[in-house]
Image (tube, grey):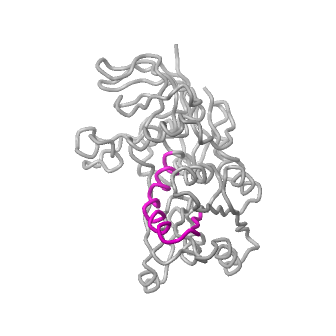
Amino acid sequence: MARRSMRLVEYGKPFQLTKEEVPTAPKGGAVVKTEYAGVCHSDVHSLDGDFRTLVPMQTVLGHEIAGTVHDIDLGADFKVGDRVAVYFHGGCGGCSRCEVGETTACLKDIKHWTGINKDGGFSDYAIIPDAKLLVRVPDTVAMDTACLLPCSGLTAYNAVCKMLPTVQDFAKHSADCAVLLVGAGGLGLWGIQFAKQLLPAGVRVISADVDNEKLAAAKEAGCDEVLLWGKDVDDDTAVAAARKACGSLGAVVAAIDFVNVPATFERIEKILATGGMHVLVGLLGVGASGSVPLMMYVLGRHQMGSVLMGSLPQLKDLVALMAQGNVKSPPISHHPLENVYDVLQDLKAGKVKGRAVVKL
C-alpha cells in the first residue's frame, strides 16, 4: 500500500506527485488517514516562498487536516479508527506552555508544524509527532467542516475572543454597539457567526469587503450591515459610511482585520471608537507597513492585538461549540488531491467563495 503526496519542489511552481510507503506512528505520535485537508491562504504563502525560512523544499503542505487514526503509539488516548482533527502547531511538548496547550508560545521555540515545516495533509496519510495534538471530532460535525477548525475556524474564534472583553465593557455602558469585520471570505464568515454566538446580545456585526457576492454571503451568515469597499470607493466615503452604520456611537467598538493590508489597517484606525480594540489577523500585507498618527492613537486610547491561530484548549472549546449545531461552516468546495495547485491559484486570485478543501 502506498500513499500519494503532493511535495513542494520549487517555490511558486506546481507540486510533484509522489508515491511512498504508508508511514508508521512515531513514538508518542500517530498517523492519520487524511479524509479532508483545507486549502488555506497560509498554503499560498508557503508555496510562493513567503515563509521560505520556515518551509523547506520537499515538504508536503496542508495544515488543516481531519481524518481517522490509522496508527498510534501505545499509551495514547486514542484508538485506530477514531475521527480526529489535527492541531498542527506542535512545540517541544515539555515546557510549561506546551503542557497547557499553548504550543504556539513554546518556551523553547520548537516548531513542529504539520503542513508547514513537517509533512502535512496534502497526502493520503499524515504523521503527527504528538498524539496530544489530536482532537476528537463528534459525529455531529462533518469531516469537511472539521478539517477547517484547527486553522481558519480557530483563528476566527480566537479573534472574536480577543475583542470580547472590550466589547463587553462597551456594552455595559451603551445599548448601541457595533463591531466591524473586514474581509468576508472564509475567516470572515466564521467570524460573523462566532461574533453572534459570543458577543453580548444586541451588539451589531458589520462586514466590509470589496466583493458584493462575498457581502451577500456575509448577510446570509448573519451580519447586520455590509459595506462595499471597492476600488472606486475613496477613503473618506468609506469611513463616513462605516461611521453611519455604527449608530449613535458613530464608531466601532472593536474591529477584526482578516485582510490586514495598509489600506484596511489605516482605515480601521479612523473608524475605531475611543478605547476600541483593533485585532490584526490577515497576512495579505506580507512585508508592507501600516501607520497610525501616534499622538492620536494614544489620545484615542486605542488597543491593538494580533492573532496567530489559537491554543489547543480553544480548539477543543470550538469543536464543542460546533457540535451544538448553531454555527455553520462557510460554503465548502471539494477538490481532488491532484488539483490542489490550481485551487491555490484560484484562492490567491480571490476566486474561492468560502473555503476549498481537498477530498482524499
Whole-percent x and y of residue 123? 54, 29
Q: Nearer the viewer, residue 170 or 235?
A: 170
Q: Is residue 142 above or below residue 226?
A: above
- From the viewer's perspective, tell me whether residue 302 is left or right of residue 249: left
Percent x, y of residue 169: 44, 67
Instruction: Identify the residue at image location x=69%, y=63%.
Output: 225
The relative height of residue 54 versus residue 25 in the rendered view (above or below) is below
Residue 135 location in percent, x, y?
A: 43, 32
- Residue shown at 67% from the left, 50% from the top: 221
Camera-side residue of 272 and 233: 272
Side of 197 where 165 appears, left or right? left
**Magenta part mainly helix, strand or loop?**
helix
- Which quadrant of the figure contains the C terminus? top right
Residue at left offset 54%, top offset 36%:
324
Q: Whole-percent x and y of residue 176?
A: 59, 69
Compare residues 217 and 230 and report the one nearer the observer.
217
User: Which of these two is toward me, 333 or 328?
Assistant: 328
Q: In the image, what residue occupies the spot 44% across and 61% down?
A: 306
> Count of labels shown?
0
Which residue appears farthest toward the top when viewing the image?
A: 1
In the displayed structure image, the side of residue 239 where residue 173 appears, left or right? left
Q: Tell me which segment is drawn in magenta.
A: 154-180
Q: Is residue 198 rendered magenta in the image? A: no
Q: Residue furthest left?
A: 95
Q: Is residue 167 magenta?
A: yes
